Amino acid sequence: MAEYTKKWTEISRGYRTHMRLEKHLSDNTIDSYMRDLAQFAHYILRMYDVPPKKVEPEMISNYMNRLYELGREKSSQARALSGIKSFFNYLLLEEIIDSSPAELIEAPKSSRPLPDTLSTEEIDRIINSIDPSTTKGLRDRAIIELLYSCGLRVSEVVGLRISCLYLKDGFLRVIGKGDKERLVPMGEMAADAVNEYLDVRPDPAGTPFDDILFLNRFGKSLSRQSMFMMVKKQALLADVRANISPHTFRHSFATHLVENGADLRAVQEMLGHENITTTEIYTHLSFEDLKGFYEKAHPRAGKQ
């Protein structure tokens, strides 16, 4: 961590100079930006231990959600995001990065509950917005089917290997956090989408990527940032609210299972959660839902 802390410090100094000499910002404004940047850098180093040029959209999105969970005012969240965007624009200017991971990030809406979910109709619209006549389209459709049908993390989809697929048997083997392995059921629609992609998938034989399922146009492993951008693009094409990420499909997977009566322990196992208290955040049912379940299930709920 010490090495990357030094890198953040060096680049932050250059950013401060840039704001003073080229942006002509006041000392108070610069100090405010630098405080927000220091908090962001501390979070990134503690959670991911990466230098500025390795920050990915999902990391920023998770940070913004963290600010929301901590009860930060909406204006404070917006200011923090503005500072983050400004910082990565500076990195673009200095040619430290090729694209900004903060470009499509939006501050969490205080009026929306967490975790955010999609309806089944919205998911169908996103999947149907994908053009299946191209290799990329078949790949992207298979990715979204797996994100939703299996509740996988972005890193798990990126690292998924062909040798871990058991399509005829309806499950796949996933290497999750801490290199822990789990088996996850897979529906027929997801299996069909993966099979259709495999029929047209480039063959990078003899390379380190020959067993990696999802490849980019160069025949290499797809990046997490590319997946984030793809999901964002398809959501916009489908006229679904833009503030979603690949993780939204994982939230939706778990929420829909729980709402339809799935056992929480089973959902915990499929998600790869070490502690069931983490899984319990997906039980964000409305009061009317809870009241309905209570009245149906509890022996003393009705009048005697």
Image (cartoon, rainbow, N blue to C red):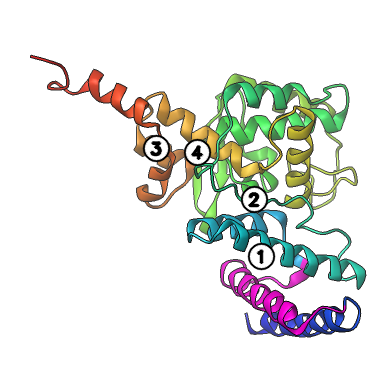
Q: What residue is shown at x 16% (from left), y 17% (from top)?
A: 302
Disc with the residue nearer the chain's start (4 vs 1): 1
Per the image, label 3 sits on a secondary structure element best described as loop
Instruction: Report which residue position mark 1 lands on.
Output: 80
User: Is residue 45 rendered to the left or right of residue 131?
Assistant: left
Disc with the residue nearer the chain's start (2 vs 3): 2
Residue 183 tag number: 4
**Kind of residue indicated by mark 2:** Ser
Per the image, label 4 sits on a secondary structure element best described as strand
Disc with the residue nearer the chain's start (2 vs 4): 2
Disc with the residue nearer the chain's start (3 vs 4): 4
Q: Look at discs 3 and 1 and give the one toward the viewer.
A: 1
44 in magenta: yes
- Label 4 and label 1: CA atoms lie apart by 39 Å
Where is residue 173, by image quadrant? top right
- Label 1 and label 2: CA atoms lie apart by 26 Å
**Residue stretch in magenta:** 24-53
**Kind of residue indicated by mark 3:** Thr
Residue 237, placed above or below residue 59: above
**Which residue ends up furthest to the top in the rendered image?**
304
The spot of residue 166 in percent (x, y) is 60, 30
Per the image, label 1 sits on a secondary structure element best described as helix
Per the image, label 2 sits on a secondary structure element best described as helix
Query: Disc 3 vs disc 4: Cβ atoms closer than 8 Å?
Result: no
Query: In the depicted view, which residue is nearer to us: 223 or 115?
Result: 115
Q: Look at discs 4 and 1 and give the one toward the viewer.
A: 1
Query: In the depicted view, which residue is nearer to us: 193 or 140?
Result: 140
